[in-house]
Image (cartoon, grey):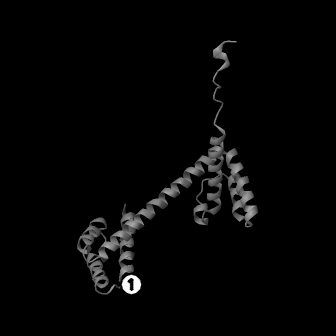
């Protein structure tokens, strides 16, 4: 036996144990997300009837321990239906992205409202609001901003945000 044969490097034989554990954990995460989805969103999940029945069973299970066992079982079913599970995971990731975008838009509107309510930044923020949201009533916003500036009117502060959000939703509907 030559020296090279003694120290031969073993050939790769598939994913490592750690990679398999990560994949299994990812499938369990998908199963947990499916169980926790609100009804309206759950109705839109692209799942074949066999998977849908398994997911429904897990969603109906109320006892903590039984629900956890059912989630593990659901994860096993998802692993056996890897193509359908990939479609479901893609759907869930799309939901996450939409939620992140909604949250970001919400924070931008909050920041714009805060600048409108700041007496030093108000004029520039009103011009920016009108540029971003053409349907906005600039005069109405200015009146509300003056109420906030004069007496820290919390009702006017909240109304500014409501109007910004309504105009933002109208602009999104027009797109």
Q: Residue furthest front?
A: 3
* Residue placed most toward the observer, 175 or 139: 139
Q: Residues within 10 Å of mark 1 (few under 14, many from 20)?
A: few
Q: Which residue is mark 1?
A: 155
Assign the C terminus to one quadrant of the image.
Answer: bottom left
Which image quarter holds the N terminus? top right
Question: Residue 75, image x and y in percent?
Answer: 69, 51
The x and y percentages for residue 3 are 65, 14
**Quarter occupied by residue 157:** bottom left
Question: For the point 69% across and 62% down, which residue is it?
Answer: 59
In the rendered image of this protein, does residue 16 appear above or below residue 125?
A: above
Q: Is residue 158 above or below residue 14?
A: below
- Look at the image and tell me whether residue 136 can be seen: no
Q: Is residue 50 left or right of residue 94?
A: right
Residue extending farthest to the top is 1
Is residue 13 or residue 163 the one in the foreground? 13
> Residue placed at 38% from the left, 84% from the top?
155
Count up the numbered dots: 1
Residue 48 appears anywhere in the view:
yes
Q: Is residue 138 left or right of residue 103?
A: left
Farthest residue to the bottom: give it. Answer: 151
**Picture residue at 31% right of the left edge, 77% below the top:** 117
Q: Position of residue 29 (x, y in %)?
A: 62, 54
Picture coordinates of residue 28, whole percent (x, y): 66, 52
Taking the image as shown, residue 126 lies to the left or right of residue 19, namely left
Q: Secondary structure at mark 1?
A: helix
């Amino acid at each position: 036996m030559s020296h090279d044969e003694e120290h031969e490097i073993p050939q790769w034989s598939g994913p490592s144990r750690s990679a398999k554990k990560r994949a299994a954990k990812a499938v369990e995460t998908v199963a947990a997300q499916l169980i926790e989805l609100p009804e309206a969103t759950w109705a839109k999940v692209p799942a074949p009837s066999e998977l849908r029945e398994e997911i429904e069973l897990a969603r109906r299970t109320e006892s903590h321990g039984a629900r956890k066992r059912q989630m593990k079982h659901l994860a096993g079913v998802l692993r056996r239906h890897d193509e359908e599970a990939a479609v479901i995971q893609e759907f869930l990731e799309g939901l996450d992205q939409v939620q992140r975008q909604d949250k970001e838009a919400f924070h931008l509107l909050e920041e714009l409202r805060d600048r409108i309510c700041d007496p030093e930044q108000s004029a520039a923020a009103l011009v920016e609001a009108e540029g971003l949201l053409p349907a906005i009533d600039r005069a109405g916003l200015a009146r509300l901003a003056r109420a906030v500036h004069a007496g820290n009117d919390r009702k006017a502060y909240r109304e500014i945000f409501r109007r910004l959000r309504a105009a933002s939703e109208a602009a999104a509907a027009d797109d």
